Image (cartoon, helix red, strand yellow):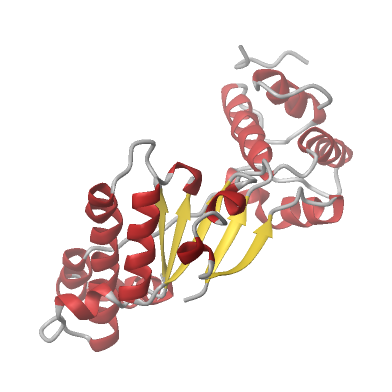
Amino acid sequence: MTLHGCGKNWGLATSGGNGHHAVLEMFSLSVVWRTFHAMPSIAALLGEKVARCRAVFYTVSVSNTPKTIDAVLGLNLIKLGYARLTVAGGSQDEITHDAARIACPLVIVDEADRLTIKSLEHLRDMADRHGFGLILMGMPGLEKRLARYAQLYSRIGFVHEFKPLTETEMRLLLATHAGDFGISFDPAQLDAIEAQAAVIRITRGNFRLMERLFAQMRRIMTLNRVEEVTADIVQAARDCLVIGPGN
């Protein structure tokens, strides 16, 4: 088969080489307010989404300072706070800036290894003042670095390392979430069963690698106008990726 297209406690989480991506649905106050008044037919749906959005996900830039953190994370905290309070109260009239700033329960910080000591201190101060829980995500060794700073380390409630997914977990994930990537494995089709086994063998429980592999599989299937996934498609997608030996 020829396939075209290849060529308030703190939580500290380390990825162990397996990336984890989270998506924040950020709604500005203006969007919420306009929807409630101009588009009442979808106001309830938007309000439900805003109410469910309880965290801000922030990826640290390579060059970071307290000022840049305030410009991005601080602003998003206020936006989310205004949106949540507007939905909860049905009006923005009595919402204060200070109230909006403390209305976010959780902040998740990815690439925390990049944080300078000044930026870490600034995050600690923000968490103390605004009362949100804080999760720092980074590569293994992050906890050892923070251990040198007693004032920071004393606030860490737990450390969790993300291990590679087991085969059972992989099969459950493929059965329930492969459709999110436009891929489906029909348990009644031999080709799909073989393709699923190939995905498990190639990725070895690495969620980031699985995400990359699925993106290539979807691209190859689109280029070749194929709807059913096969082991050949999985292998062709694997050949497109830069993967370490043994996969």
Going by the image, does 145 lie left or right of 189?
A: left
Residue at 53% of width from left, 63% of height from top?
153
- Give the total number of marks visible in the rendering: 0
Above or below, 24 against 180 in this view is below
Residue at 40% of width from left, 73% of height from top?
132
Q: Quadrant of residue 45?
A: bottom left
- Tell which of 232 and 188 is nearer to you: 232
Q: Position of residue 5 (x, y in %)?
A: 60, 17
Going by the image, does 73 lie left or right of 160?
A: left
Going by the image, does 237 lie left or right of 25?
A: right
Q: Position of residue 23 (x, y in %)?
A: 46, 55
Q: Position of residue 121 (x, y in %)?
A: 37, 58
Screen quadrant of the C terminus: top right
Going by the image, does 179 lie left or right of 193?
A: left
Q: Position of residue 108 (x, y in %)?
A: 46, 60
Screen quadrant of the N terminus: top right
- Tell which of 141 and 69 is nearer to you: 141
Residue at 39% of width from left, 36% of height from top?
62
